[in-house]
Image (cartoon, rainbow, N blue to C red):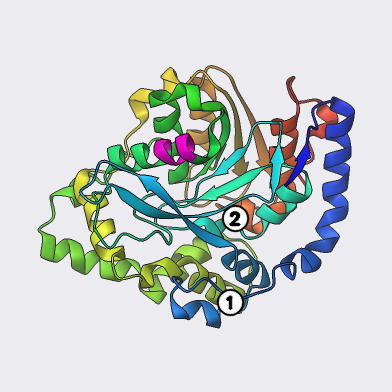
Amino acid sequence: MMSLNWGSPSTVMGVVLQLKMNSNRLKVLAAGSNGEFPPFLPKQVEKIKDPFARSLAKRIQRLPVQMDFPDKCIMSSCIKPVIQSKNSPLVLLHCFDSSCLEWRCSYPLLEEAGLEAWAVDILGWGFSDLENRPPCDVASKRYHLYQFWKSYIKRPMILVGPSLGASVAIDFSVNYPEAVEKLVLINPNAYAEGTRHLAKLPKTIAYAGVSLLKSIPLRLYANAMAFNGISFFTILDWTNVGRLHCMLPWWEDSTVSFMSSGGYNVISQIKQVKHRTLIICGENDQIVSYKLVVKLHSELANAIMRQVADSGHLPHVDKPTCVAKLIASFALCDEPFRSQLLITK
């Protein structure tokens, strides 16, 4: 593997400028992965047209993660980095009921910046082998991520969480502070109070609701809210990317397990976070209130906030170059952000 150590401000500036040039090379990056799709992916992956999703899907691997469940090991899905850096590695989480493919546009740019980046599927979502039906409550998700970190990363990481993934990151950093160096929270849904009344639904109704959750009309509506100015055909294709993991046979059981457990409620943990934190928010986010993002910024002990222009709920998808610049600057600079690194357009 290539080893890089990019830490000086001048080098960081070079990375940011290079990222701007790399934005013109996205087609090349998307075509950079040859070969076949992993056999464990649902066959519907063949119908996806997005070249970045197809390219990243071919890199998905399953790695063994030791757990305390009966079979003790889960083959856990992720994207492994091709770069081994002396800087802190990035670990990229995803939103509620999503997968590592959420990073299809930003991931190649982060690699081009010389960052060691892991895109990890949260237990219960993504493409891990859950044939043995492990519990998928908050404690299990946290422990699974810790065991993954302990087995493969083994040094303090920059943990990146979008939307509900921000709650996952906050919860993890409070419980395992030694595993985290910095946090990046993207349109953080940090004030959600778990699944609330959904946790008390009878199982038959819960399963019926979960089946609706993977339906194309509902997913189309969610994507229409999440993105701004995207064509219908692109949204339809991105809907197929976002629901691909729902085709796995254990997805319904895993999602009901999470819903019934009560879900994430990290409100009481926010002020316990001591790590340096970058908050990235989309200017036109229709899902997480800007007021709540500002509130989170004020309650975190050591946070800075940056807004991405003309972006919705998932700026790492619709504005990948901007998000990659912000993350690279934050990851590679040992001192607070300098104004010349703050490129948000």
Residue 183 in sight: no
Q: Main secondary structure of the magenta part?
A: helix
Circles 1, 2 touching at the beta carbon (< 8 Å): no
Mark 1 or 2: the one toward you: 2
Which residue is drawn at the image coordinates 48% and 66% (left, top)? 242
Could you tell me which secondary element the residue under label 1 belongs to? helix
Magenta stretch contains residue 147 = yes
Q: Which residue is mark 2?
A: 103
19 up-or-down from 104: above or below: above
Position in image of residue 292 (x %, y %): 47, 34
Q: How many marks?
A: 2
> Foreground residue, 154 or 248?
154
Position in image of residue 237 (x %, y %): 56, 75
> Foreground residue, 35 or 328?
35
Q: Residues within 10 Å of mark 2 (few under 14, many from 20)?
A: many
Identify the mark at residue 232; answer none if there is no mark. Answer: 1
Residue type highlighted by circle 1: Phe
Magenta stretch contains residue 41 = no
Residues shaded magenta: 146-151
> Foreground residue, 133 or 75?
75
Residue 256, picture quadrant: bottom left
Position in image of residue 321 (x %, y %): 75, 51
Q: Residues within 10 Å of mark 1 (few under 14, many from 20)?
A: few
Left or right of 287 in this view: 52: right
Could you tell me which secondary element the residue under label 2 belongs to? helix
Residue 335, picture quadrant: top right
Which residue is drawn at the image coordinates 26% and 50% (left, top)? 258
Residue type highlighted by circle 2: Trp
284 up-or-down from 281: above or below: below
